[in-house]
Image (tube, coloured by chain):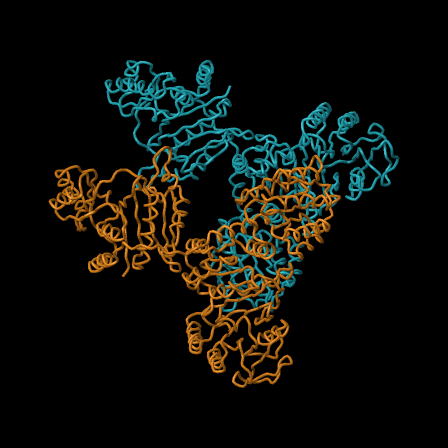
Chain colours: A cyan, B orange
Amino acid sequence: MADLASLFHPKSVAIVGASKTDGEIGNILVKNVLASGFKGSIFPINSRESEIEGLPCFASLLEVPEKMDLGVICVPAKHCPEVVDECGRVGIKTIVVITPGFKEIGPEGLELEKKLLAVCHKYGIRLVGPNCVGLMDTHIPISASYSAVFPLKGDIAFISQSGAMLVSIMDWSKSIGLGFSRVISLGNKADLDEAAFIEALADDPFTRVILCYIEDVQNGRHFLDVAARTSRKKPVIVLKSGTSQAGALAASSHTGALAGSDLAYQIAFKQAGILRANSMTELFDLALSFSYQPIPQGDRVAVVTNAGGPGIVTADAIENSGLTMARFEKETLEVLRSHLPAEGNIYNPVDVLGDARADRYAAALESVLKDPNVDSIVVLVCPTAVTDPENIAQKIIDLHGKYPDKPIFSAYMGGGVLAEGAKKLAQARIPVFTFPEPTVYSIAGMVSYARTSAAGAEIGEIELDDIDQNRVKAIFYDVFRDGRSVLLGSEAAAVAKAYGISAVPVKLSVTPEEAVALSEEIGYPVVLKVASPKIMHKTDVGGVKIGLHNSEEVRNGFIEIMENVQRYLPNVIPHGIEVGKMMPKGTELIIGMTRDVQFGPLIAFGLGGVYVNLLKDVSFRLARGLTRQEIQAMITETKAYTLLRGYRGEKPSDMFSIIDMVSRVARLVLDFPEISEMDINPLLAYTDGYSALDIKITINI
Amino acid sequence: MADLASLFHPKSVAIVGASKTDGEIGNILVKNVLASGFKGSIFPINSRESEIEGLPCFASLLEVPEKMDLGVICVPAKHCPEVVDECGRVGIKTIVVITPGFKEIGPEGLELEKKLLAVCHKYGIRLVGPNCVGLMDTHIPISASYSAVFPLKGDIAFISQSGAMLVSIMDWSKSIGLGFSRVISLGNKADLDEAAFIEALADDPFTRVILCYIEDVQNGRHFLDVAARTSRKKPVIVLKSGTSQAGALAASSHTGALAGSDLAYQIAFKQAGILRANSMTELFDLALSFSYQPIPQGDRVAVVTNAGGPGIVTADAIENSGLTMARFEKETLEVLRSHLPAEGNIYNPVDVLGDARADRYAAALESVLKDPNVDSIVVLVCPTAVTDPENIAQKIIDLHGKYPDKPIFSAYMGGGVLAEGAKKLAQARIPVFTFPEPTVYSIAGMVSYARTSAAGAEIGEIELDDIDQNRVKAIFYDVFRDGRSVLLGSEAAAVAKAYGISAVPVKLSVTPEEAVALSEEIGYPVVLKVASPKIMHKTDVGGVKIGLHNSEEVRNGFIEIMENVQRYLPNVIPHGIEVGKMMPKGTELIIGMTRDVQFGPLIAFGLGGVYVNLLKDVSFRLARGLTRQEIQAMITETKAYTLLRGYRGEKPSDMFSIIDMVSRVARLVLDFPEISEMDINPLLAYTDGYSALDIKITINI
C-alpha cells in the first residue's frame, strides 16, 4: 500500500503523449483529468505543442519545473521505455502506460514489455498496464484514463483485466446510479497486478467492497495470501473467466495468459474467502447489495408481500439458496395479526394482501424488522388498484433508517406503474429488482461471505516435527540415479514412513528365499506383488498373490509370479517381488495430489478402491496453508465421511489419525516440489488408525 | 378446444355485477372491455342502473334480448350460483367468475365452490376461476379482466395461477415492449385448469409459445398427456413454484393446493417435453427469445464481439450451458481475415476490435451467418470511442432480415450510450440484454426444447402379453386375508415371476426337513432367511445363513436361525424360513417404485447394494407411458450404466433383459395401484440375464 500512495493520492500528474487533436487518446486523457475535477497540477507533455486544453504544455518531462507523482503515458509503444527512463530521472514513482503493442501482440511485444519493466525496476517505478484503460478515483478525484464515462462516487472498487468491460460497466453503472470508489484497468499486468491492488484496497477507507474481473492470476500464492487477508476485512468478489475449455482457449488467444485449471481457482477462491460470481449479473447484483446494505447476521429471511404467488416464488428461492425462512416470535405474530385483515398471512411469507396501502406495509415491515429471528428482509410489491409504490418506498426507506442494521431488499414487480417508487428506493440505497429471485441470491451471497469471513479464511501451517526429509531425499536420489521417475512400492512406502504416514510394510525381495525371510519378519499372512514401474496393471499379468500363510506358499508364489510375468511380458525384467503385510478389511479411501501451475499442489480426499473414477466422491484443497480444521471440512464434504462416521451400525473410523495423515501428505508434497503426482489408493481406515495400502509417487527431475 | 370457442372468440359479453362507481371491480371490468377495443356487444347487468359507461344496463341476464357468449361475473360470492343458473337459462356457455371467497377461504368457501360447479355442470357451462383476474386477448381483442394494463399484441400466451403475478407481468412487459396473445388468470381452477388452456392454445395460430406460472397441477395424468402433445407443436415453459419445503408450505396456506413432491414434477415436466424455468427472469427471457427468434437448428454458437473479455465470458457461458462454440468453415475464416485487422480474432469468438464501426460488424456477422457450422449467433457490443450502437443495431436487423432462419441474440453492454441502439433492436424483435450470459441461457433453453421436441416427448405403452394378473391378485388376496401389507420374500418373488421378472427362486419352509427338500429342488448352494414381515434387518438377529452346500448344513442352518430369532426377538413368531438359490456375483442394481399423488408411480433405477442410500446413484421416470427408449435413457443417466457397459475390462451386462425387466416393473405397479412401495435391491445383472435377489412389496388395501 505504501508503495502505491502516489497512485492513489497523486498531487500532480504528467500526461506524456498529450495531444491537441480531438478524439485522440492523448487529448481524451487531458480532458478526462480536467473533467474529473482533479485538484493537483496537470502537466501535458508534447514537444510539438505549447498549450493543450488551456494547460501549458512541456516538450519533455525533464523540462517540468515541479515534482510529479503520477505519469500517464500514451506515446507509441517503442518510445515507452525511453519515456519511462525520463520518468525515473525526474523522480516519478508511479506510471500508467495506456499504450498497447506489448505482450498481447506476440514475442516482439513481449520483448518490449520486458525492456519497459527493466527500466521501471532500475528506478523503482511501479507500473499500471501497459495496454490498459487507466485508473479512475472518485474520491481524490481523478480520471487517469480514456474511459468516456467517469463513474458516480461510491464505495465499490472495480479491478478489471478487460478494458472494454470496464468501460461498459462505467456506462451501465451510471444508468442505474451505482457508484465506485476506485476503478482500475489492469492491462497486461506487467508489474502491478490484481493482488497488488486488492492489497492496496484492503485498508482503503473509501472502499467497502472489492470487485475483480480477471482472466488469470499472476502469482497464485501471493494472490491467495493477499485475498485471504483482505477478505477478512471486506468482501472480495471475483468474476474469473476462462473457466471452460472454450473460454480458456479464448483467454489465451486474447491476453496470452496461461489460464490455470478452473478447479484450482475454485478451491483457491474458496480457501481465500473470495466470493465467486458466476455471471456479470451476479457480480454487480452482489456489488450493489454489499455497497447498499449491511451484511446479514444470519441466514433467516423474512418476506413481506402483497401477493401470494410471488411470496411462494421467493420462499422457494430462499430454500433453494440454502437460506432459511425466518420463524417469527409469538409477539411478532400477534402484532401482525392486529394489523392485517383475517385473510392476510401472518406467517412468513407475510401477505399484507392486494389492498394494502403504505401504512399496512409499514406496520408489517416494522414488526418483522424488530423480530430477533429475522436477519434480513425481502419486500415484494405488486401493482394493484390501491398500491401506492412511492409511499411504500418511503416507508421502507424510513424504516431502514430506523433499523439500519437489518438489511432490506425489494422487488418492485412491474414496469411503468412502479418505476418512480423503484427509483426512490435505489436512490436511498435499498436494492430494488424487478423479480424476487435476485434479492434472494444477493442475500445468499452476503450470508456466504459472512460465514466465510467469520470462519476466518485462515491460511495456517501445521507443525510437524517427526519428519525425516533426508530419508526422502536419499530415496529420491536413488530413484534418479536409477533413471526412473516412478517410485517402486517399497520406495513409496519408505517415503511415506519418513513423513509419519502409516504405510503397509512393503519390502523388496529378489529371490524366493529373501521373500520368505521378509515374510517371517513382517508376519503372515502376506501379499506378493511384482515390482516394476513398467507394469501398470499387476493383477492382469498374474503379478499378485494375496493371503499367503506360510513359507511354502510364499516360495511358490514368488516363482509363479515370475513365471507369469515372463509369459505375459517377456521383455520386462522386474526389479523383484514386493512382500507386503496382508491387511484386514477397512474403509477404502483415496488421498491424492495433483499440481496446479498457479496454486501448487492440490490434495484430493474421497472414497477409494477400484470404483474411484466411477464414484468421483472426491473433495479438494490446496496443500498450502491447509489447517486441521480445513482437512476436517474437506473430509466432511465427501460420502466417504458418512462411511467413516460409521455407516449402518458399523464402528466409526479413527478420524484423528486420518486428519493427521492428510496433513502429512500435504507437508510432503509442499516440501518436495519434485513430486509431480501422488496417489494413495486404497488407504484403509480402521477404528484404530489406518494403513496406506498402495502408494504411487511420481517425481520430476 | 371446441368447448372453449366462446371463451376465445366471444361475439358478445355480459358483465354481471357491473357498476357505475369508479374504482369498483364492476366498473373497471366494463371500462376494460371497452378500452380493449372489443368489437362485439357488451351487456352490463345491474338491477339498480339503467346505463353504465354509456352502455344500456339490464336488470338481469334474463332481460337481455340477444344471445350472449361469455359471462363475466363479479357479484358477491354467495350470489354467484344463482347468477350462473341464469347464465345457463339464457344459454351462456362460458363464464369467468372474478369474485373471491371460495375454496381459498376455507371449508365454507369450498362448499360454495362445489355448488357453483354443480350449476355449471347442470348447464354444461365451462368456468374460469373463481377468484381470478380474468382473461385478456390481444387478437380478438378483449379484456375480460380487471388488470389495469392491457398488454401489447404479441404471440406469447401466459397462464397464471397467481393473479398478482399476472398483473405485475402485464405492467412490466409493456415497459420492455413484450407482447402477448392471450393472458389467462386461473384463479381456483374449479373447472378449467392449466391443462385445458394448454390444450386450447396448442393449435391457436396467434400463440407461438405458452408460458405457465403454476403452484400445483389439478390432474397429473391429463396434464402430462396434454403437455406432451402440445410441446411437440410449440414450446410450453413452466415456472412451478412451491418446489421447496418452505415454498410448498406457503403454497398450501395460500391456495389450499396440495403440492406434489417436486421430484415428480421435475420428471413429469421432462417426460412431457416441458421447459422448466427456474426463476421469473428465466421464464421471461425464454418467452422473449422464443417469441422473437427462430429455434436454433443445433447447439453451435458463434460470438461476434468488439472486446476480448466479454467474448471470453460468453464462451464460458456457452460451454457451461452445454452448448458448443461453433468452429468455422475455412471460407468463413478467409472472409473474416479479409475484413478484420490483423490484431482481430477470426476464430470464435470473433473479435472485430474496439475500433470496429457498423460496416466491420456487418461483414463479420454476415460471414458467420452464412457458415453452415453456426446454429445461432451472439453479438456483443461494448461502448468505445468509435462504437456506433444504432448503426450496428441497424446492420444486425438488416442481416437478420436477410438470414431469418438463424437466431441472433445481442448484449449491449452499457447504459446511456447504448440505450437507443438497444431499443431499436428490441423493437425489431432481436433479443437484447445488458450482459452476455442471458443470451446464452436463452439459446440453451431453446436448444433444449428443440432436442426434446425432436425426440418426440412420446408417451408410449409397452406391450407385454406374458403376464399373469390373476396370479398376482391371488397372492395379494392371501396377503390381505393374512392381515398383512408387506409381502413375504417368497410371495414377492412369485409376484415378480407372474410378471416375467426373473427372481431368485425363493420358497417358504416351516420345518428343517421341508427346507432340505426345497434346497434339493432348487439346487445347492442355497441361502436361508427368516421369513417375517416384522423383522426388518434379518442379518442383525442372526436370521440369515448363506452358502449352504448340503442337507446337513441346511438342517443345522434352519435350527440355528430359529434359535437366534427366538433369543433376539422372543415375541416374534416367524412365518418360517425362506430357502433361496445362492446366486453368483453380479452388478448390484436397485429398481424401486414410489407413488406420487399427482403423477402416479415413479420408477427408480440405479446402483444397488448396501450403499444405495449413500451413493444416491438413482434416476427416475414416471411409470406411465414409459417407453423402452426412455428406460434406456434412464439407465444411461446413472453411474450404474458405466458398470453395466463393462467397467475396467469386465464384460458388459445384458442390457436388453434389464430394460425388459424395468418395463415389467412399470407395468406391474401400473396394473396394481394397491402396490404402495416396491424395491428390488439388489438385482444382480449378469452378462446373460439378471436375477432379482431381494424384492420388497408393500400393498395398501
Residue A408 image offset from top left, x and y in percent: 58, 54
Residue A488 image offset from top left, x and y in percent: 40, 20
Number of numbered discs on residues: 0
Figure check: A518 above or below B589: above
Taking the image as drawn, is residue B545 in sight?
yes
Residue B16 lies left or right of residue B191; in this view the side is right
Taking the image as drawn, is residue A191 in sight?
no
Figure check: B280 above or below A697: below
Q: Quadrant of the C terminus of chain B?
A: bottom left
Question: In terms of depth relative to the viewer, which is nearer, B181 or A665?
Answer: B181
Q: Residue furthest left?
A: B513
Question: In terms of depth relative to the viewer, which is nearer, A99 or A425?
Answer: A99
Residue B484 image offset from top left, x and y in percent: 23, 57
Q: Residue furthest right?
A: A50
Residue A308 lies left or right of residue A563; in this view the side is right
Quarter of the view holding residue B564: top left
Question: In terms of depth relative to the viewer, which is nearer, A5 or B216?
Answer: B216
Residue B53 image offset from top left, x and y in percent: 64, 79
Q: Residue at x 44, y 39 (%)?
A: A637
